[in-house]
Image (cartoon, helix red, strand yellow):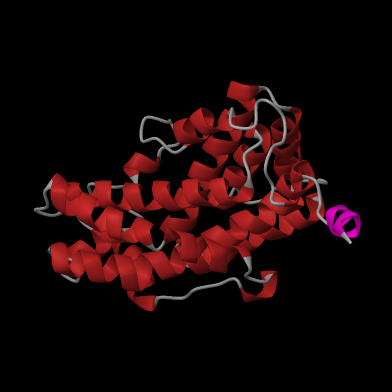
Amino acid sequence: MKSARATSIKPRSSRRKEAGLSTGTDSYAWIGSLLQAGDSFYPTGSYAHSFGLEGLTQEGVVRDHATLEKFLFLSALPALRRTDLPLAAHAWRALEAPDWDRIGEISVLSSALKTAREARAAAANIGRQRAELAAVLHGHPLAREYLRRATAADWPFSPPVSAALEGRVLGAPLPAVLAGVYYATVASLLAAAMKLLRLGQNGCQTLLTAAMRQSAADIAAATATPFDEIGWFNPWLDIAAARHETADGRLFIS
């Protein structure tokens, strides 16, 4: 009885592999590089974008800590959970083989979900920068092949796809890649808010902490999202982003 039970338990290395975790002695070597990729110091150009937040402040919709909190939890985080996180999850899985047709499909969908032209251009620029950095800094053949195919097929560059590419290049597991996307997105948004509103660092850190408390649930939901259910539409944000493009004065590109 004991022997039969023992043989039904998979080795730890197999369980770790199925979860997307490394099994060698360098199983955590990716942590530092993943933190580097999500840092504001990393030259992706994201610091120059507010991703529609400046447009909302110009409209007076987001004007203080309370309205910023509402925007974060009713708009930004649901969009993250239903678009960028599942896109990155599907791209991470597709890059294992790799399935290049699937990567192209994900790239096109990622761009199409950005309805405002300014938002699409911002995403394409950031996605390209991240992919090029993955190839230049790490010299990985997967990153070089992705750039070659994306250029040849004219795929729209996508931040979620590039984040998944970084994860594969670094050997990072899927939950860590998505956690990196989650943190970097929220932190970048709140950093922009500090430049647009009368907010202190403590106020922004309070919102960041509250957002990160629900990150595990959001990541789990995104990981289980089928490809044909990816999507989120918020006309409130899209209209503000479109108006921002023709604003008389702008602090951010988007």
Residue 245 occupies quadrant: bottom left
Q: Does the rendering let one see residue 253? A: no
Residue in the image at 84% along x and 53% along y: 6
Q: Main secondary structure of the magenta part?
A: helix
Q: Looking at the picture, how far across and down is residue 174, in whole percent?
A: 62, 49
Query: Magenta part of the protein: which range?
Result: 2-8
Residue in the image at 55% along x and 72% along y: 231
| Magenta stretch contains residue 64 | no
Q: Is residue 240 above or below residue 27?
A: below
Residue in the image at 66% along x and 35% along y: 171
* Left or right of residue 149: residue 184: left
Most distant residue in the front direction? 1
Q: Looking at the picture, how far across and down is residue 55, in whole percent?
A: 26, 62
| Magenta stretch contains residue 3 | yes
Front residue of 57/178: it is 178
Q: Does the rendering let one see residue 141? A: yes
